Image: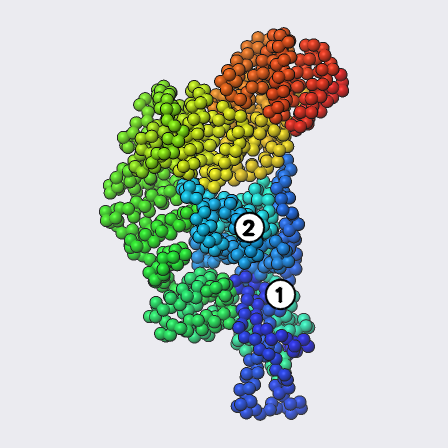
Amino acid sequence: MTETKLSNGALHEQADNSIDCANDHDPLSLSIRSNYSFSKPESLAQLRPERGSGVLPIITKAENRQLEKTMAELTINKLKFNSMGLIGREQEIATLKSCYRSLETQKSGESSQFSSQFLKADKDLVLLHGFSGVGKSKLAETVKEEVAASKNAMFAEGKYDFVTMDEPFSGIVQAYGSLCNQIKDSELGIREAVKLSIMENMEQETEMLKELIPELGSLFNNQDIDSISVSTRSSLGTSNENRQENWRHAFRLFTRILGSFFHPIVIVLDDLQWADPASLDVLEYLISDVQNPYPLMIIGCYRSNEVNETSILYNRMQDLSDKTERFAFRITDIEVKSCDVDAVNKMIMSMMSIDDEEKTQELAEACYKRTLGNPFFLIEFMKLLQAEGLLEFHLGLMKWVYNVSKIEDATMSTANVVDLLQTRMRKLPNDMQVLLQYAACLGSSFSPSTLQFVWKENRSIILTDDVSNVDDMLKLAEQANFMESCGTDQLRWVHDKVQEAALSLSDLVTPAFQFQLGLCLYHGLENKELDKRLFDITDLINKGAGVSREELATLNLRAAKKAQRTSAFLSASKYIANGIRFLPSDSWDTDRWLPLQLYSRGAEIELALGRTEKVDEYVGAVRNTEACTLIETMPVQVIKMRSLVSQVVIADSINDHALALLKKLGFQLVWNRKLVRAQALTLAIRTIKKVKRLSVHHFASLRKMKDPKQRAILNILSIVRVVAFKSKNVFLSMMCACKMVELTLAHGVSDMSGASLGGLANAAFFLKHDHAATLQISEMAFAVHERYGGSRVAETIFTICPHCLALVKPLHECLPMMMKGYSHGARSGEIEWALFNMVMYFIGFPYVMGKALDQMLEQFPKILPQVEEAKLKPHILFVRVFWQLAVKLQIVPSEIPTKLDGDIFIQDDEVALNPMHVATIHLAQGELFLFHGHYEALANQDIEKGDLFSDSAKTNFMIPMEAFHRGIGLYAMAKRTKARKYRTRANRIQKRISKWARDGNPNVKHYDLMLRAEQASLNRRYGVADGLYKEAIIQAARTGHLHHAALFHERYAEYRLKDHGDVDDGKYHLAEAVRYYSEWGAVGKAEVLRKEMEAM
């Protein structure tokens, strides 16, 4: 027998009977807090045997009852789990706190500054992984102490569980609900400021997030909610792609707003191995948000033994590890291992209040053999030893007594912590064991009122009619360290292993049992509560149902719709599949709307997941039934077309499919496909003439289109128009736009009307250069969106601004509209069009306008991650090409022509196959030739490729600049070589630009002046040339075109030096060229010119 004395301090232990599960770091599992607190007895002498007597004193029954009461009040005879702390985790704690402090030191706004190459990492994803029970959750909570010491930081936790793992966003919702509650409990001034910022910046995102995070709604009153306009709400995207982008934007925007008031924000997501894909999407959204300048720390805990190369979590983490540099975040990997024997010994010493490690070494070694150093297992093992009498405190001797040999013999069969927990559970009353199993089916957290309702409705299983004892049993479960309170009317399991033990405690929890439990909740809960627990209840029913029932199919459809609204497409797909499984065999004949909705929505969801075979299966099910009309099948027909687009099927195949559908609907788009050009021109001229006679606000006064047939036709035409637009089939795109406008005039407006008017405005400029019509029709398109909202604002703006308005209005007047297109598109989920607007706003327009290269170079690292995240090849190529161009423009020009390829952009075979990609590279390479002074290379490129860019882009605000720059190179070579081939081509470009200037394009005035100056110089009309050069320089400088002011001074200096021999005037204009090149950022070119001046 081993006898171990208490340390001196043990007798003065405070009477706090709260017990912490020391080293299992799950916040849901660590604390068992008793409601009882006892005072210490004044003297313990009566509990000890008389010295020298050899026998224990004889005591009466009354004295025995008093002794038992006194023993119950003592704390010295209890294992002290709360005193353990995190033993053996010093290194892990130091790493975690170091990560937090590195974020805390970053000041607000500091991280929004970018170098020309890389973003500053101000976000940290910390991954804590190890076996269950090693203390990952408790370790994550150590950061909470750091947050508490900070003035502005926030800390929130969310947990996933294995029972409700299909429920979308469960852990995210818990964490963000906690953040909202913290805002609600903050000072009034801060709370109102946060609320005001949310209302000003989020608008419809608030409505979205409220459905998912009820706590957000508690921040607002009814008047606040009503202030969100109906038109703003209607601008949310409704396609799956748009919905996903809606949620991405909503979570990012909400986090940015919170970060502006509280930073760093720390979010702990526990048991990520059970997280649904939608939650992992949100995690990626947040950690990769390059537009969030505020520090953010996400701590993800997961069981390493349950995550392998085939799991979603593993592959998502691998993807994220490849993005750290581009998206400016860090990943810190911390493996949490089991403790060694020394750490186990220290834990036992702490539990038993012993300060001599040699006295507990033998016990520690025995415990280590049984628990392998797992802290949570160790705690449960020690509880078992005490419960079984293998470890007890001898009050007479004032010692812990145990026999290691007996412990080893008695615990040989203990396999894992679940066995230990179930051993304790089976000693509880039978009713309580049943109650634990009911609670385990409800998830990692649950409402006691819900559990009481289920208890009341299932008396046939319960062994007593006493319903009131549920509260008493739950209190007992809390005292036994199985559950703990986590808010008003909410309990949670202290550890997922406890829930797992309860779930498998007996044979009660079968699929049939879960089915009946789900049905009980489905039929018994109020609709509001049912919607709140919709996923849990549907999952319970789906686990056990094997019968066909329409109401269960309807329930799954309801769950699928809710999951789809939150972009949880995998979960939605499962609900659709179960809904179809529950359909009666004659459902098409008895109630065709239910199967039609299931198959149609299923096809849409599978398209979002990229599972085209499943799309075809669901589409085929609708096509093959005779129960539906042609119009009723149109939604799946359109989904099939979108599926073809997503598979990058060639445009002709998509058009064939579309034309066949339109023909079935009695609509003829093309009479003869060989004559599309002629038909398009005739139709466009007729439609433009018709629309010009209408007032600007005529379309905004039309009724909304309600005819399902006409909406189906519009949908098909819209898809064909976009496909044709992207494939540069100008005339087919034009024809679709005209037909859509005609349908709008005849049948009313829809969310596609604005975009179709944008296409018509484009046609008005492309065909006739009719500036007045272009402006009028553009204003009509914007008026429609202003009146009816809709989800295609970004598409309309991009169709109009860079392709129409920028050719008839000053470029700077288009910028606010482009920014609106970006912000509205990001909100409505039009990510492709939103990013088109963003790229042009931050890169395309500033370059053409001659803004400083340094300003652009600050934007590239912010923009590239966003377009790469969206996997949009045209955007990616444009950003990389112009980033590479900007970098090359800063270097010293070489004597041989500089190639565009570099570290940022390398042309490959895939790029060479896309005409628009080739045209973009052609443009950028010409820019490099021009500003590096390689005029011969630029002129020869023109001779070889001609109007390659304008032929590919058709209508694009960069066309005039690209042509103008070719003209400069051609005139330079014509003067240098006197070759007719250069003169002829230069004069042709000059005439074209002069016509654009006469037609009213305000952005080409200085282009026209400069080319006329070059032409006059070539023709030796020196007086005219001098005046035109000076006027061109003044115009370029006045409009802020730094690159052109520099180029014009450089060209004029060469003219003054070579044609007039005026060194002083030449040096003056070279100096001005150096100044403007330096301001623009072409420092290498400025240095070359400076050396030329010095050599004169």
Q: Residues within 10 Å of mark 2 (few under 14, many from 20)?
A: few
The residue to which callout 2 is attached is 193
Tell me the tag on residue 85: 1
Tell me the tag on residue 260: none
Residue 21 location in percent, x, y? Answer: 56, 67
Picture quarter containing residue 355?
bottom right
The correct choice, above or below, for 58 with respect to 771 in the image is below
Q: Which color scheme is applied?
A: rainbow
Marks 1 and 2, Cα distance to the nearest angstrom? Answer: 39 Å
Quarter of the picture holding the C terminus:
top right
Quarter of the picture holding the N terminus:
bottom right
Asked which secondary structure carries label 1, the reply is loop
Q: In percent of the image, x 45 and y 47: which residue is there?
A: 227
The correct choice, above or below, for 91 with respect to 595 in the image is below
Q: In percent of the image, x 61 and y 77: which residue is there?
A: 76
Identify residue type, mark 2.
Ala
Instruction: Please indicate whether residue 898 sits to the left or right of residue 839 in the image.
Output: right
| Along the line of sight, the residue nearer the viewer: 191 or 241 | 191
The correct choice, above or below, for 908 with respect to 206 in the image is above
The correct choice, above or below, for 1023 with respect to 680 in the image is above
Q: In percent of the image, x 45 and y 46: which residue is there?
A: 228
Residue 147 location in percent, x, y? Answer: 61, 56
Instruction: Please indicate whether residue 647 sits to the left or right of residue 51 in the image.
Output: left
Identify residue type, mark 1.
Gly
Mark 1 or 2: the one toward you? 2
Asked which secondary structure carries label 2, the reply is helix
Query: Quick one: label 1 or label 2, which is nearer the N terminus?
Result: 1
Q: In percent of the image, x 51 and y 72: which residue is there?
A: 479
| Along the line of sight, the residue nearer the viewer: 876 or 848 | 848
Q: Are marks 1 and 2 in contact (CB under 8 Å)?
A: no
Res 505 visible: no
Residue 208 location in percent, x, y? Answer: 45, 48
